[in-house]
Amino acid sequence: MNRNRLAKTFDRVLNVLATVAGILILLVALFVSYSVTLRYMHIKPPIWILQCTEYALLWITFLAAAWLLRKDGHVRIDTLVMRLSARTQRILEIVTSVLGFIVCVGIAWFGTTKTYDLYARGIMDVKGVTLPEYPLFLVIPLGGMLLVIQFARNLVKNLKAPEVKEE
């Protein structure tokens, strides 16, 4: 598979996962609204709503993070960055890509070891619905690896970018 086709496939995967995260956001909003409505009517909402929304927030974060990074949609302090020269901005992009890569390797590694530990020990989540915990945490190594790949892509893009001449 050539590099361009692999990049397009990766982008499609990120788009699908971001769509899943969007659907989860919608479900969380519906579940929370349902829960609030029940409380307003003095009816105790089902405990599984809290459990589902807690895990959905984890999944939303890790499913959409690499897509957001690809779109350059993370929070930035533009007032400071825009005052820097183009060359300094490029260097800053390279440094943040390297640091992000390193941090996300750590997240993916820790997530993998933690998820495997939960699997090996058979740890169960018993809040509302009894479930094994390891499938709930699989998204951490998955999202971490997607971020590693996207930070690497950003790094390569910034290293290949032509040098901007200052006036």
Image (cartoon, helix red, strand yellow):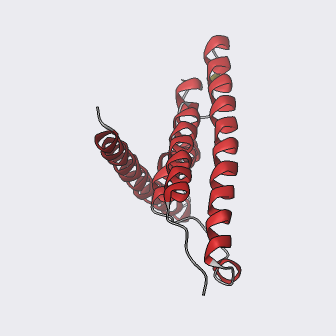
Give the x, y percent position of residue 141: 57, 33
Picture quarter containing residue 133?
Answer: top right
Q: Residue at x 67, y 75 (%)?
A: 77
Q: Is residue 114 above or below residue 73?
A: above
Q: Nearer the viewer, residue 70 or 64?
A: 70
Give the x, y percent position of residue 32: 51, 58
Q: Nearer the viewer, residue 16 or 158?
A: 158
Describe residue 2's horizontal placement relative to residue 58 as left or right.
Answer: left
Q: Is residue 61 above or below residue 118?
A: below
Q: Is residue 167 above or below residue 95?
A: below
Q: Residue at x 39, y 46 (%)?
A: 17
Q: Is residue 141 above or below residue 151?
A: above
Q: Residue at x 40, y 52 (%)?
A: 18
Quadrant of the frame with the N terminus: top left
Describe residue 99's horizontal placement relative to residue 11 as left or right.
Answer: right
Q: Nearer the viewer, residue 129 or 17?
A: 17
Quadrant of the frame with the C terminus: bottom right
Describe residue 19's horizontal placement relative to residue 155 as left or right.
Answer: left
Q: Nearer the viewer, residue 18 or 155?
A: 155
Q: Is residue 121 visible?
A: yes
Q: Is residue 45 visible?
A: no
Q: Residue at x 68, y 71 (%)?
A: 88
Give the x, y percent position of residue 85: 66, 79
